[in-house]
Amino acid sequence: MSRPAPAGPERRYRCAGAREADAEKGEVRVLEGRTALVTGAAAGIGRASALALARAGADVAVTDVDEAGVAETARGIEEAGRKALPLVADAGSAEDARRSVEATVRQLGRLDVLYNNAGVALVGQDGFTPDVTPEVWDRVIRINLSGVFYLCHYAIPQMAKNGGGSIINAASSMASVPLGGMDAYAASKGGVAMLTKSLCAGAGRLGVRVNAIGPGYVDTPMNSVIWQSEPLKEGFARGHATGLQSAEEIAELVVFLASDASRSLTGALLTCDRGWTAFKQPELLSAPPSR
C-alpha cells in the first residue's frame, strides 16, 4: 500500500471555525467531521467513550453483542447531535470485524477513529494456568487480543484512504503488572500492548497512529464484584494513589487520543491507572492517614 501525502493544515485545522463557534457555547468539537467506531459500546467505558466522542463532534458506529445496550448508546449519540450506527457484532469474530468496518464506511462515509474497547474478564473461569481450560483460554484470547487484530486489519486500509487516523486499543493495568490468578486475561492484555507497539511503525507510514491505554480498576459491569463489596472496594482503592476510577475519565483520554492534540503519541501504552502500577505497599503502610 502506498504512503499517502502527509496531512496538511487543511485537514488538521479544517474545522477551526466550528471549534470557535462551539467554544463560545463552552464546547470544543475537536473531532468535528470525523467518524469513529467503538467496540464493546453497550455499557461501561465503551458507552462512556462513544458518548464523549459524539460530544467532541464525531459521528459514531457502536458494536456489541448486547443489542439493547448498543441501541441505548446509539440514542445517546443522537441526543448529542451526531449520527449513530448501532451494530450487533462479536468482537472476537473476523467476519463481524469486516462487516463492522464496511458498514461504518458505507453508512457514515469514512473511518477516522477506532477504539478497540471490547473485552472479557472471566472471573471464576480464568485463573492459574493449570486450572484454566483450553476453551476458556481460547475465548479470552479470541475476544481480547484477536479481536483487536481483526478490527485493525480491516480498519487501517480504510483510514489510509482518508490520509490517516487514530486507533486506541484497550490494554489494562495488567499489561504492566498482572494481578495474579487471571493468566489468560493478563496474557491477552500484554499481547494488546505489544501488538500496539509493533503496529505503529507500519501504520505510521499510512498516517495512522496506534496507542493503547491501561486503566486501573474502573466502575464498570466487568468490575461489579469489586463495587458490590465494600471491603474489596476499599482495598482496591488503597492500591490506587488517588482512588478508583470512573468510566467517564477514561473516555476523556480516548477523546484526547482520537484528536490531533495527541499527534506526538503513537506506539504508546498510557498507564492511566491512578498510580496502580506505579507502586505497591504492604497493607499496613497503605492504611488511611490518621487525622
Image: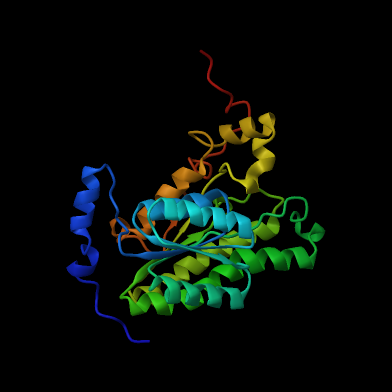
150 is higher (above) or lower (below) than 228 = below
Q: Is residue 17 left or right of residue 263?
A: left
51 is higher (above) or lower (below) than 249 = below
Instruction: Name the quadrant containing residue 230.
Output: top right
Q: In this view, does 222 lie to the left or right of 80?
A: right
Q: Residue furthest top?
A: 291
180 is higher (above) or lower (below) than 231 = below
Instruction: Give the position of the N terminus as an image quadrant.
Output: bottom left
Q: Position of residue 200 (x, y in %)?
A: 41, 70
Residue at 20 percent across and 62 percent down: it is 13
Instruction: Name the quadrant containing residue 203.
Output: bottom left
Residue at 59 percent across and 52 percent down: it is 174
Q: Where is residue 55 in the image (x, y as percent from the top left)?
A: 37, 51
Q: Is residue 46 visible?
A: no
Residue at 63 percent across and 65 percent down: it is 143
Residue at 30 percent across and 75 percent down: it is 163
Q: Position of residue 280 (x, y in %)?
A: 56, 38
Q: Is residue 23 visible?
A: yes
Nearer to the camera, 30 or 258: 30
